[in-house]
Image (tube, helix red, strand yellow):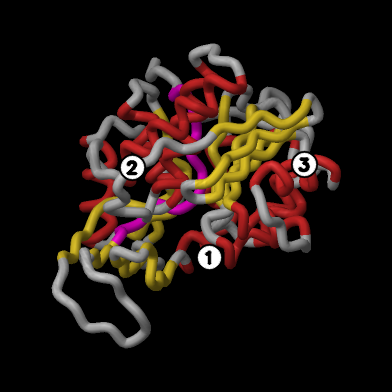
Amino acid sequence: MTAQPDILCIGSVLWDIIGRTPAHMGAGADVPGRITRLPGGVAMNIAMTLARFGVRPALLTAVGRDPEGDELVAACARMGLVTRHIYRSDDLPTDRYMAVEGANGLIAAIADAHSLEAAGDKILRPLTDGALGREEAPWAGPIALDGNLTVGLLADIARSPLFAAADLRIAPASPGKAERLLPLLPVANATLYVNLEEAGLLGHCRFTTAPEAAAALVDRGAARVLVTDGDRTTADGSREGIVTADPPAVLVTRVTGAGDTFMAAHIVAETRGEDRATALRSALDAAAQYVSGDIGS
């Protein structure tokens, strides 16, 4: 019998095409730099970080049966990720994400996750057919879920018995998709990971600090929410109160994937039994190492 994975990562798995330059950039800038293509997507970034910590993640996503998809699945397998539950589509291309980063941070990005959206609930079949669970015996371990799924599918997940026994950890994917998570906000077994801008979109309010945002979202019904704010104070809010910590000061060399690294490291820290304060510091340390380029992508 094949061993079950330690955690499920549900959402976007695609090719990241990232242009980086040490120069400050504005609209219309044309500067020298480096362009890389790497496996990416929120679910993928989380899974890669989990694997670096010795956790065995399985991917539930959509990948095309095109050369780019074959190459992507092979890359995932080489990193120790479980790929046998990926939905492979004959008529949908493999998704892509393109970003430009300068010394002043993320300049612009476009996420082409249309194939994931078009695949819909087909990516969840392993949770219903017995491969990873079924309605009468749902998956009872941790799940990392990203907001690249459609509004309708996220709403279905919020009320689905297939997710009722899981430790559900959720990321919005981007500020533009943050409001997709509103149906999941009051789910009792859900922990949301958002930045300050995303928290404001979920709370329909402009917050000035992460602790303020975390407290407000808990008041709105969230069971637990972690709010980051760049190099400023990060907050972990729940009905038991607010825990805060400041990120380490580092030289930032990249930003794409930092939030996903923070979330994955936090999941691992809590799996190890760390308390809320210690787990928050562990996650911030891991994210700082990532943005400074001290660990691989």
Q: Magenta segment, which residues?
A: 5-16
Can you tell which quarter of the image residue 289 is in? top left
Residue occupying the point 24% across, 60% down:
68
Q: Would you name the residue on which mark 1 appears?
A: 118
Q: Residues within 10 Å of mark 1 (few under 14, many from 20)?
A: few
- Residue at image location 41% in from the left, 36% down from the top: 248
Residue 182 shows in this picture: yes
Closest to the observer, 253 or 267: 253
> Is 66 or 94 nearer to us in this picture?
94
132 up-or-down from 232: above or below: above
Instruction: Write down the residue under mark 3.
Output: 215
> Which amino acid type corresponds to the residue marked 3 in the rendered image?
Ala
Residue 22: x and y, percent?
21, 64
Q: Nearer the viewer, residue 190 or 29?
A: 29
Answer with mark 2 or mark 1, whichever residue precedes in sequence.
1
Q: Residues within 10 Å of mark 2 (few under 14, many from 20)?
A: few
Q: Which mark is residue 205?
A: none
7 within the magenta span: yes
User: Badge 3, how many Cα within 10 Å: few under 14, some, many 20+?
Assistant: many
Quadrant holding the N terminus: top left
User: Could you tell me which residue is drawn at 24 percent across and 54 percent down?
Assistant: 38
In this rendering, the count of numbered labels is 3
Question: The residue tagged with tag 1: helix, strand or loop?
Answer: helix
Choose between 88 and 198: the one closer to the eye: 198
Foreground: disc 1 or disc 3: 3
Task: Specify whether 69 is left or right of 179.
Answer: left
Say which element carries label 2.
Answer: loop
Residue at coordinates 40% horizontally, 72% vertically from top-left? 108
Asked if marks 1 and 3 touch (Cβ < 8 Å), the reply is: no
First in sequence, mark 1 or 3: give its number: 1
Q: Which residue is mark 2?
A: 250
Closer to the observer: label 2 or label 1? 2
